[in-house]
Amino acid sequence: MANELNYKKTLKYLIILMVSSIIIVDLFIVLIPDEHSQHAIAIIILNITGATATGLGVIAVVRHGISGSHGKSYLFLTIGIALWFAADVGIMYSYFVLHVDEFKRITLLDMLWLSGYLFLILHLISIIRTIRIRNLSITLTIISAVIIGFVIVNFVSFLPIPESFLNNGKIDAAERGYGLSDLVVTILYPILDLCLIVPSITILLNIYREYHHSVPWVLASISLLVNAIADNGYTNDYINGSASALPWDLFYIADFVIMSGALFWYNRYHITDHISKKKKRNEFIN
């Protein structure tokens, strides 16, 4: 009972901290009158939150180790976050040192983001393998509806592609500055987002009742869903020739903040419990 109250108290303060942090940061960025200053501050805050999430992930991996399904899950999650953070560091370097806004172009940094997706998908799959699907029919129905809705929304958004990207069967790179590789990489993002959305929803639908264990998985899944929304919005803007860092940077910052909360809970409870049980087993054996 004492532990349950402790969990609820910690969760309450954690949610208040995350929500207030996101609101304060977003308002601070939005209220800056100069657009260039807005973008610069958003990049800095994005890297701070990315560094925090990556650091907490590294701590989790070091403390738990990479053995077992949970160890591999922490490792995949941390590598995925670290790759996204590395891409954001690249954006910051390009913007402040090279004076090039990489956010509006398809570059090698996109390979870091795309690689990060693969590890985050592995993370979600490793979680799904450890949980019990409570109601398969409901889960499949909701996921099917989400997939159909996602495909329809993206199809409608991408419908202007033949007019805006194509000219007599060829990519009109001169008009918009885009090439075929830009289009392919851009379309990969919503596809990979869907690969995050489906397992995230599966997890959210099936572990919400397991209070202690569900908190970090729910937070991590919500974090990846927020990222998917931002990617989808940015991709639509990019396709329409109006790529912009804002408001999508606000979503990416929220993504890292929520992920940091998930990793805090992993470290505070899951891994601490794991270390305590491991120590007791060793004492019993000895």
Image (cartoon, rainbow, N blue to C red):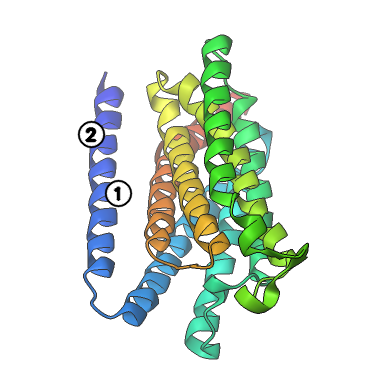
- Judged from this view, the residue extending furthest toward the right is 169
Name of the residue lying farthest toward the bottom: 98
Question: In the picture shown, does residue 69 fall above or below 81?
Answer: above
Q: Residue at x 40, y 55 (%)?
A: 251
- Residue at 28 percent across and 42 percent down: it is 15
Residue 72 or residue 208, whichever sits in front? 208
Q: Quadrant of residue 74?
A: top right
Residue beneath disc 1: 18
User: Label 2: how many residues lie within 10 Å, few (<14), some (14-19) or many (20+)?
Assistant: few
Of 97 and 230, nearer the camera is 230
Residue 9, numbered circle:
2
| The N terminus, quarter of image | top left
Task: Name the amino acid, label 1.
Answer: Met
Marks 1 and 2, how far apart at CA: 14 Å
Discs 1/2, front:
1
Amino acid on which the number 2 mark rests in the picture? Lys
Residue at x 51%, y 29% (from the top left corner):
201
Label 2 sits on a secondary structure element that is helix
